[in-house]
C-alpha cells in the first residue's frame, strides 16, 4: 500500500514511433527499437529513427529526477543534413557557431550530452564532413566538398583536417574556436591553400582594405598560401589574420603601384589586416624581367595606402607605361629627352604618411639608348650610364653617348660624357651642375640648330667648321631673381682643323682654351649676355693678311661680353705670341692688346710689338666695318735693327754655305684693306739697309754677275733705300737707291704681290777708281768718267732676268767695246 516503495521495470518496443523535443523542434519519425525503463530510469538501446532522409540512432540512459537527474545520451547519424531544420533545432550558442561557417551538405554526427549533477552537464558533438559546402564568415570564401572532422564541446570547436578539394583547388583547415558559450568568442584557425584562382570570388571574400588593394592591381592566376585566422577572446579585439601567399602563373595590371601590366608572376607575400609584406615577386613586363619587394599598408577609411616598395626591371623597352611610373616632375624631365631603347630600372617608392606625396628614388641604367631634346635638337645614340631621379634632383653618372645618325659629319672616335645633377624644388627646376666631356665633335649646322634661337647668330658668325674636344669641370645653371637661367661654365676646350670665314677670308687654326669663366645671363629685353674669360693657345693659325698666308702660334687672353642679336658689348684680347710667320718671315714674342669699342664698332690695337731677326717691330692695328658691312683693317708698323742675313735666310733660296746677304735693316709698313679682298689694299712701305754685303743667293747677285763684278758673293754697299706704295696686288717702287764704293744703282718699278713677278728699271753708275781687275763699269769709268747704264730686271723675284742697256748718250761708245751681254 506504500506507493513509494513500489518498483517498476519494463520495456517499450517501438515500431513506428515519432517524437519531437519541444526545445529542439527537430521531429524524429519511424522510430524503431527498444526502450527499457525502471521506476527512475530510462535506457535507450540502439533506437533508430529518421528525419526525412536523415537516419538517426539513439543510445544512452537517464536516471533520477531533479535535482539529482543524471543522463548520458548519444545521438548519431551517418547522413545528417546540414540544413535549416537542423539549424532551427540548435541552441542559441550552437546557432552562433553555425553562422560562423554557414555549412550545407551532409555529415556524419555523434552528438553526446551528459549530466552528472546540477552543476555538471555538457554537450559534445563530433561531425564528420561528407562533401559539405561552407562559407567562413570572417573570410567568406566558398569552401566546397569539405571533408574532415569538427568537434564541438561546451566551450569550443575543434577543426581537424577539414579539406575542400574541388575544381583543382585544395583548401585545408585546422584550428579551434573558443568561448562559444560566452560573448567572448575567440578562434585560431590555420588554412593551407593550393591553386586558388585570383578571381572575383576571392576578391569578394577579402576585407574591405584588401579588396581596394586588389582592385588596384587586378590580379589573375593562381595562389598557394598558409593562412592563420585568429581572434582573441578579450573584449574589443578585432579579428586578425596572417596569410603567407605565393603566386604562380599570375599577372597584374595596376593603375598605381606600379602602373604596368605584369605577367608570368611568381611571388611570395605575407598578408595581414594592416600590412602586405612582399617577400619575393618576379614576372615579365613584355620581354623584360620585373621584380618587386617591400611593404604596403592598406589605407584606413578613405585614406590612400602607405607603402615602401622596391621595383626592378631588367632590359625593358622604354615606353609611356614606364614614364607613367615616374612622378610628374621626374616624368617631364625624362620625357623631354625623348629617350628610346632599353634600360634597367630600379625604383624605390615610399609613402609612409598618407597625407604626404610619394617619395621616390629611381635609378635608370641606360643600355645604348637614343635621346633627342627638342630644346637641344642634337641627336645622341648608344647612350650608357646611370640616371638617379628623386623629388629633389635628377643625377647623371657616367652618361656616355655618341652623335646620332642624323648628325651629318661625325668621327668614329666621337663621344660625349656627362656627370652632374639637376636640383628640383616643388617639382620645378631650381639649379643644375654638370661635368661635361666631348671628343671629336664637329661644329656643324645640326649643332648650331640645337642652340637657343638667340645664340644661333653668334654660333653661325664665330664658330668655325671644325672638330672640338671639351673637358668642362663645371657647367652650373641657376635661377636669377627674375626666374631666368644663369649659366656658368669652366673648363677646357680643344679645337682642331678649324676653318673660319671672316668677311670672305678663310682662317684656319687649332686651339686649346682654358675657360676661366663663361657665363650666360638674361638681359632685360629677353636677350642673353655671354661673358667669357679664357686663355686660348692658338696652334698653326693660318690667317689671310693682305693676300698673304700668315701662321700664328700664340696665347690669347680673351675677356669679352656678347649680347645675342646685338653683338659684342666689349672685348679685350691680350695676345702673347710665340711665333708669327708671313711670306716666309718669322716674328717671335709677338705681344699686343686689342680692344673692341662697341660705340664705334671697331677693334684697335695700339701696342703691337715683336722680335724680328735680332731687331724689333712695333705697330698698331684697327679693324672696323665698311659701309657695305664688311670688315676692313688699317695696319701701321715700324721695324729697326733687323739682321738682314737672318731675315733673308727664311726664303726659298737655301744653301748649306754662308751665301746670304748681310746688313742691318729698318723701315715701316702701312697698309689698309678689306678682309679677304686683296684688290682693296692701299699702303706704303719704306726700308733702309746699311752695311749691306750681297751674298750669292741674293737676287742682287745675278745683277752683279751681269755687271761682271769680281766677287758678287760679298759685294759691299753702304746703304740701300726703298720707297714704295701698295695698291691692290701691286707693289709700286717709287725709288730704289743702292750705293756702294764700287757702284751705285737707283731706279723704280713694279712687283706683282701674287705672282712675285717684278719689272724693275735701274740706272747703274760706277765711280772712277782703280782696281786690280776692273769691271765693265770700271772700264767705262776709266775712259768716260761718270759712265751711265740702264738695267731692266724682270721675271721671278727669286730668279730674275737681268737686261742691260746703255743710255743713248753713250751707246756708240759702248758698241766700240762690243755688244753687251744681252741686248734689248
Image: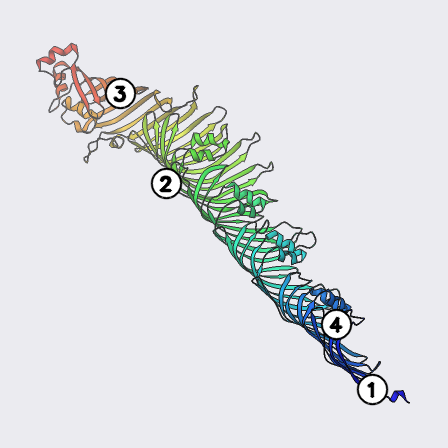
Q: Nearer the viewer, residue 295 or 736?
A: 295
Q: Mark 2: few, some, or many residues within 10 Å (few <14, many ≥20)? A: few
Q: Nearer the viewer, mark 1 or mark 3?
A: 1
Q: Are marks 1 and 3 in contact (CB under 8 Å)?
A: no
Judging by the rendered image, the residue that carries numbered circle 2 is: 411
Q: For the point 63% across and 49% down, which residue is it? A: 357
Q: For the point 50% across and 27% down, which residue is it? A: 566
Whole-number angstrom distance, CA of label 4 to CA of label 2: 103 Å
Seen in the image, is 129 located left or right of residue 512?
Answer: right
Seen in the image, is 507 located left or right of residue 366?
Answer: left
Q: Relative to 548, does residue 229 appear above or below in the rendering? A: below
Q: Nearer the viewer, residue 461 or 331?
A: 331
Judging by the rendered image, the residue that carries numbered circle 3 is: 751
Residue 546 locus on image (x, y percent): 34, 24
Seen in the image, is 400 located left or right of residue 237?
Answer: left
The label on residue 8 is 1
Q: Nearer the viewer, residue 732 or 270?
A: 270
Q: Mark 3: few, some, or many residues within 10 Å (few <14, many ≥20)? A: many
Q: Earlier in the sequence, mark 4 or mark 2?
A: 4
Tell me the quadrant of the picture where the N terminus can be found. Answer: bottom right
Whole-number angstrom distance, CA of label 1 to CA of label 3: 167 Å
Which of the 4 image quarters holds residue 618? top left
Whole-number angstrom distance, CA of label 4 to CA of label 1: 27 Å
Amino acid at each position: 500500500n506504500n506507493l513509494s516503495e513500489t518498483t517498476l521495470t519494463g520495456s517499450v518496443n517501438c515500431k513506428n514511433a515519432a517524437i519531437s523535443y519541444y526545445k529542439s523542434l527537430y521531429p524524429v519519425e519511424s522510430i524503431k527499437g527498444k526502450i527499457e525503463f525502471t521506476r527512475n530510469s530510462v535506457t535507450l538501446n540502439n533506437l533508430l529513427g529518421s528525419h526525412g532522409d536523415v537516419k538517426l540512432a539513439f543510445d544512452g540512459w537517464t536516471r533520477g529526477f531533479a535535482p539529482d537527474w543524471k543522463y548520458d545520451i548519444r545521438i548519431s547519424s551517418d547522413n545528417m543534413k546540414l540544413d535549416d531544420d537542423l539549424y532551427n533545432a540548435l541552441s542559441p550558442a550552437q546557432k552562433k557557431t553555425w553562422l560562423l561557417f554557414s555549412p550545407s551538405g551532409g555529415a556524419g554526427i555523434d552528438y553526446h550530452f551528459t549530466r552528472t549533477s546540477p552543476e555538471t552537464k555538457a554537450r559534445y558533438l563530433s561531425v564528420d564532413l561528407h562533401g559539405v559546402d561552407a562559407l567562413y564568415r570572417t573570410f567568406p570564401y566558398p569552401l566546397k566538398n569539405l571533408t574532415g572532422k569538427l568537434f564541438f564541446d561546451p566551450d569550443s570547436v575543434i577543426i581537424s583536417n577539414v579539406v575542400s578539394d574541388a575544381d583543382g583547388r585544395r583548401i585545408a583547415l585546422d584550428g579551434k574556436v573558443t568561448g562559444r558559450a560566452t560573448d567572448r568568442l575567440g578562434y585560431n584557425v590555420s588554412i593551407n591553400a593550393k591553386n586558388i584562382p585570383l578571381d572575383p570570388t576571392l576578391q569578394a571574400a577579402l576585407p574591405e582594405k584588401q579588396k581596394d588593394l586588389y582592385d588596384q592591381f587586378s590580379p589573375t592566376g593562381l595562389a598557394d598560401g598558409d593562412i592563420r585566422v585568429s581572434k582573441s577572446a578579450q573584449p574589443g579585439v578585432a579579428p586578425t589574420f596572417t596569410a603567407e601567399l605565393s603566386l604562380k602563373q599570375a599577372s597584374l595590371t595596376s593603375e598605381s603601384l606600379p602602373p604596368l601590366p605584369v605577367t608570368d608572376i611568381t611571388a611570395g607575400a605575407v598578408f595581414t589586416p594592416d600590412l602586405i609584406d612582399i617577400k619575393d615577386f618576379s614576372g615579365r613586363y613584355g620581354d623584360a624581367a620585373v621584380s618587386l619587394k617591400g611593404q604596403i599598408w592598406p589605407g584606413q577609411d578613405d585614406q590612400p595606402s602607405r607603402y615602401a616598395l622596391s621595383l626592378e626591371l631588367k632590359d625593358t623597352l622604354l615606353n609611356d607605361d614606364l614614364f607613367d611610373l615616374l612622378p610628374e616632375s621626374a616624368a617631364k624631365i625624362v620625357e623631354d629627352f625623348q629617350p628610346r631603347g632599353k634600360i634597367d630600372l630600379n625604383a624605390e617608392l615610399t609613402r609612409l604618411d598618407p597625407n604626404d606625396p610619394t617619395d621616390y628614388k629611381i635609378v635608370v641604367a641606360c643600355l645604348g639608348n637614343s635621346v633627342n631634346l627638342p630644346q637641344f635638337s642634337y641627336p645622341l645614340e648608344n647612350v650608357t650610364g646611370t640616371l638617379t631621379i628623386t623629388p629633389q634632383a635628377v643625377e647623371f653618372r657616367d652618361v656616355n653617348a655618341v652623335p646620332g645618325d642624323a648628325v651629318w659629319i661625325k668621327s668614329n672616335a666621337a663621344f660625349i660624357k656627362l656627370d652632374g645633377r639637376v636640383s628640383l624644388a616643388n617639382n620645378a627646376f631650381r639649379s643644375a651642375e654638370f661635368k661635361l666631356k666631348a671628343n671629336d665633335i664637329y661644329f656643324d649646322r645640326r649643332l648650331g640648330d640645337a642652340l637657343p634661337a638667340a645664340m644661333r647668330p653668334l654660333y653661325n658668325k664665330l664658330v668655325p667648321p671644325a672638330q672640338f674636344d671639351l673637358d668642362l669641370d663645371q657647367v652650373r645653371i641657376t635661377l636669377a631673381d627674375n626666374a631666368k637661367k644663369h649659366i656658368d661654365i669652366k673648363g677646357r676646350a680643344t679645337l682642331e682643323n678649324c676653318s673660319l670665314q671672316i668677311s670672305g677670308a678663310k682662317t684656319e687654326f687649332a686651339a686649346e682654351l682654358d675657360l676661366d669663366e663663361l657665363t650666360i645671363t638674361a638681359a632685360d629685353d629677353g636677350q642673353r649676355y655671354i661673358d667669357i674669360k679664357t686663355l686660348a693657345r692658338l696652334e698653326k693659325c693660318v690667317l689671310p693678311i693682305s693676300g698673304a698666308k700668315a701662321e700664328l702660334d700664340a696665347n690669347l687672353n680673351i675677356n669679352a661680353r656678347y649680347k645675342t642679336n646685338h653683338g659684342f658689348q666689349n672685348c679685350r684680347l691680350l695676345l702673347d705670341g710665340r711665333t708669327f710667320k708671313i711670306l716666309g718671315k718669322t716674328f717671335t714674342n709677338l705681344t699686343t692688346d686689342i680692344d673692341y669699342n662697341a660705340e664705334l664698332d671697331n677693334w684697335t690695337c695700339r701696342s703691337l710689338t715683336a722680335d724680328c731677326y735680332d731687331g724689333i717691330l712695333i705697330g698698331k692695328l684697327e679693324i672696323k666695318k665698311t659701309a657695305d658691312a664688311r670688315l676692313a683693317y688699317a695696319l701701321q708698323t715700324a721695324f729697326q735693327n733687323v739682321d738682314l742675313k737672318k731675315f733673308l735666310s727664311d726664303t726659298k733660296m737655301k744653301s748649306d754655305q754662308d751665301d746670304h746677304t748681310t746688313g742691318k735693316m729698318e723701315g715701316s709698313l702701312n697698309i689698309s684693306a678689306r678682309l679677304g679682298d686683296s684688290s682693296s689694299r692701299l699702303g706704303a712701305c719704306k726700308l733702309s739697309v746699311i752695311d749691306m754685303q750681297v751674298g750669292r743667293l741674293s737676287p742682287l747677285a745675278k745683277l752683279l754677275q751681269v755687271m761682271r763684278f769680281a766677287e758678287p758673293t760679298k759685294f759691299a754697299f753702304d746703304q740701300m733705300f726703298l720707297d714704295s706704295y701698295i695698291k691692290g696686288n701691286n707693289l709700286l717702287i717709287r725709288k730704289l737707291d743702292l750705293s756702294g764704293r764700287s757702284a751705285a744703282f737707283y731706279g723704280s718699278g713694279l712687283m706683282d704681290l701674287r705672282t712675285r713677278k717684278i719689272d724693275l728699271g735701274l740706272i747703274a753708275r760706277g765711280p772712277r777708281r782703280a782696281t786690280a781687275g776692273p769691271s765693265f763699269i770700271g772700264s767705262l769709268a776709266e775712259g768716260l768718267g761718270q759712265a751711265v747704264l740702264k738695267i731692266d730686271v724682270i721675271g721671278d723675284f727669286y730668279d730674275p732676268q737681268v737686261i742691260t742697256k746703255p743710255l743713248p748718250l753713250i751707246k756708240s761708245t759702248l758698241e766700240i767695246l762690243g755688244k753687251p751681254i744681252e741686248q734689248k
